[in-house]
Image (tube, rainbow, N blue to C red):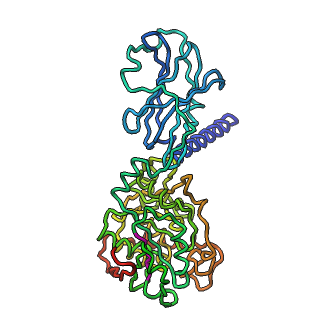
C-alpha cells in the first residue's frame, strides 16, 4: 500500500513539474522560439573551439554568446554572425582539452530596447571539451567555410532610436499612422490634453469621433475652437451614438476608403499616456504587422471566461512572436492605446455585434477582440521599456461616475468598483450565441460629417 502511495505521489510531482516547465517555456517567447546547438571542433592546427549555432523566430538586432570558463573566473562575450534570417553562429575559443565551458546566448531586442538572455541554456548545457583529439571533428576551413564570428561584442552600446530600425523604417514608409478617440459632451474639453501629451510626429491626422447628441442623456456637443482649429484634428460627427466603439467605426469607415493601408491607434479621453506611446506601438506593429497590439491585455480567464472557448485562442497562443516585449492575449484593452491595420476591421460587422445587447454595446474591448479572434487576427500585449501599462495613468476624468468601468451606460446606480467581469461574461454569452455568420442582418451604415481644417 505504502509503495503505491509513494508511486502516486511521485507521479503527481512529476506531472506538476512538467506542467510548470511547459507553462514557463510557453510564456517565455525567447525560450519557446530558441534552438541552440553547440559543437566542439578543432582546426587544422589542432586548436579546439566551440561552434555555437542558434535559430530563433525573434527578430534581433545583435546576437552574441557569453562563454564562462573555469567556474565563472573568466567570461567573454562573442558576437554571432547572421547566416540567414533568424539563424546565427559564432565560435568560442581557443580552448584547452578537458576544459569545461558554460554558454549563454543573448540578443538585442529593438522593441524591448534591451538584451534578452537564454538563462536556462547556461544552467542546462555545460560543455566539456574532450581530452582526446581523436573524438573531436576536424575541419581545415573553420574560418573560411562560413561567415562565422569570433569578435567581441560591446554590451554597453544601446539599441538607439527604434524608428531608425530598418524593419520599422520600411513599415512606416508603407503605412501612415492615424490617431482616434471618442468622448462625451462633459469630457470633450479634456481631449486636447490627451492629444498634447503624445508625440504626434508619426501621426498623419487625429480623428475625434462623436455623435451629434450623446446617447445616454441626449446632450449636444459643443466642440472647442482649439480642436476645430488644430492642424491635425478632424471631427468625424455621426448621426447616432454607437457607444464606446465610436472611436473605431467612423475612422475605419473613412480610412478603408481613402487610405486602406493605414494603421490606426486608438486612445481614451481619460488616460495620461507617455509621449512614446505611438512610436512604440508603431515599432511593435512593424515587427508584427498582422497583429493588433495594446499596452494592456488579458486572457479571457481573467474575467472568468473560458480561454479555450474564446475565438482564435489556440492559434493566438502559438503565434510566432518576433520580440520578447510582446505576449499573446485574448482581449486587448483599449484604455492602454491599441494599434490596428484598418484593413483588418469591418466597421459594419463591428457595429452589428456591438448592438446585440446592452452589455455588448458598452463592452467594446471584448466585442472587438471577439471579432478579431473570429478572423484569426493575433492580439498582443506590448511590454516595452518605453511603453507599458505601468506608465499609463487614469486622470481625474476617468474617476468620475460616467466612466464605463464604473457601470456608466449599463447601471442606473453607478458602481464604485470595476464591473467589467460581470458585463463581459454577459456580453460573451451573447456573442457566443448570436455572432452572425455573415452580414445578412440589417446594418445601419456609418455616415458622418467631416469638420476641421480643410485639406485632408
Q: Is residue 272 visible?
A: yes
Front residue (pair 425, 370): 370
Residue 136 vs 229, above or below: the answer is: above
**Quadrant in which residue 69 is drawn:** top right
Q: Is residue 374 visible?
A: no
Count numbered badges in the picture. 0
Quarter that holds the N terminus: top right
**Is 183 positioned to the left or the right of 290 in the image?**
right
Estimate the x, y position of residue 179 in percent, counting from the top left.
44, 68
Magenta segment, which residues? 205-210
Estimate the x, y position of residue 86 in percent, counting from the top left.
41, 38
Front residue (pair 60, 314): 60
Residue 374 vs 133, above or below: the answer is: below
Front residue (pair 293, 455): 455
Q: Can residue 450 be found in the magenta stretch?
A: no
Quarter that holds the C terminus: bottom left
Residue at figure coordinates x 57%, y 73% from the top left: 270
**Quadrant in which residue 284 is drawn:** bottom left
Residue at figure coordinates x 38%, y 17% from the top left: 141
Amino acid at each position: 500500500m505504502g509503495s503505491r502511495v509513494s508511486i502516486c505521489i511521485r507521479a503527481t510531482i512529476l506531472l506538476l513539474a512538467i506542467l510548470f516547465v511547459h507553462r514557463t517555456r510557453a510564456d517565455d517567447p525567447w525560450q519557446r522560439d530558441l534552438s541552440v546547438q553547440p559543437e566542439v571542433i578543432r582546426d587544422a592546427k589542432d586548436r579546439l573551439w566551440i561552434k555555437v549555432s542558434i535559430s530563433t523566430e525573434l527578430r534581433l538586432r545583435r546576437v552574441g554568446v557569453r562563454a564562462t570558463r573555469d567556474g565563472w573566473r573568466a567570461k567573454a562575450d562573442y558576437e554571432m554572425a547572421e547566416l540567414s534570417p533568424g539563424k546565427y553562429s559564432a565560435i568560442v575559443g581557443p580552448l584547452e582539452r578537458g576544459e569545461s565551458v558554460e554558454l549563454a546566448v543573448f540578443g538585442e531586442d529593438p522593441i524591448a530596447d534591451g538584451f534578452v538572455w537564454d538563462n536556462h541554456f547556461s544552467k542546462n548545457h555545460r560543455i566539456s571539451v574532450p581530452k582526446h583529439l581523436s573524438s573531436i571533428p576536424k575541419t581545415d576551413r573553420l574560418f573560411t567555410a562560413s561567415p562565422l564570428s569570433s569578435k567581441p561584442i560591446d554590451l554597453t552600446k544601446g539599441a538607439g532610436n527604434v524608428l531608425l530600425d530598418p524593419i520599422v523604417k520600411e513599415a512606416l514608409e508603407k503605412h501612415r499612422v492615424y490617431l482616434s478617440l471618442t468622448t462625451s459632451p462633459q469630457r470633450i474639453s479634456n481631449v486636447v490634453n490627451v492629444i498634447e501629451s503624445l508625440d504626434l510626429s508619426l501621426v498623419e491626422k487625429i480623428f475625434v469621433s462623436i455623435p451629434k447628441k450623446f446617447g445616454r442623456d441626449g446632450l449636444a456637443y459643443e466642440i472647442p475652437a482649439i480642436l476645430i482649429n488644430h492642424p491635425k484634428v478632424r471631427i468625424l460627427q455621426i448621426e447616432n451614438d454607437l457607444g464606446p466603439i465610436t472611436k473605431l467605426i467612423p475612422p475605419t469607415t473613412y480610412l478603408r476608403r481613402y487610405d486602406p493601408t493605414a494603421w490606426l491607434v486608438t486612445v481614451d479621453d481619460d488616460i495620461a499616456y507617455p509621449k512614446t506611446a505611438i512610436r512604440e506601438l508603431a515599432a511593435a506593429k512593424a515587427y508584427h504587422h498582422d497583429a493588433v497590439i495594446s499596452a494592456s491585455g488579458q486572457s479571457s480567464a481573467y474575467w472568468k471566461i473560458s480561454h479555450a472557448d474564446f475565438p482564435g485562442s489556440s492559434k493566438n497562443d502559438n503565434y510566432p512572436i518576433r520580440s520578447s516585449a510582446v505576449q499573446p492575449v485574448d482581449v486587448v484593452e483599449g484604455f492602454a492605446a491599441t494599434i490596428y491595420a484598418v484593413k483588418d476591421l469591418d466597421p459594419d460587422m463591428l457595429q452589428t455585434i456591438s448592438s446585440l445587447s446592452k452589455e455588448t454595446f458598452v463592452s467594446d474591448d471584448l466585442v472587438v477582440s471577439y471579432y478579431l479572434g473570429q478572423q484569426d487576427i493575433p492580439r498582443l500585449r506590448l511590454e516595452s521599456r518605453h511603453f507599458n501599462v505601468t506608465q499609463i495613468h487614469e486622470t481625474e476624468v476617468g474617476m468620475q461616475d460616467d466612466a464605463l468601468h464604473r457601470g456608466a451606460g449599463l447601471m442606473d446606480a453607478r458602481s464604485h468598483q470595476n464591473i467589467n467581469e460581470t458585463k463581459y461574461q454577459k456580453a460573451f454569452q451573447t456573442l457566443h450565441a448570436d455572432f452572425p455568420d455573415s452580414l445578412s442582418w440589417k446594418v445601419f451604415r456609418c455616415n458622418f460629417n467631416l469638420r476641421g481644417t480643410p485639406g485632408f
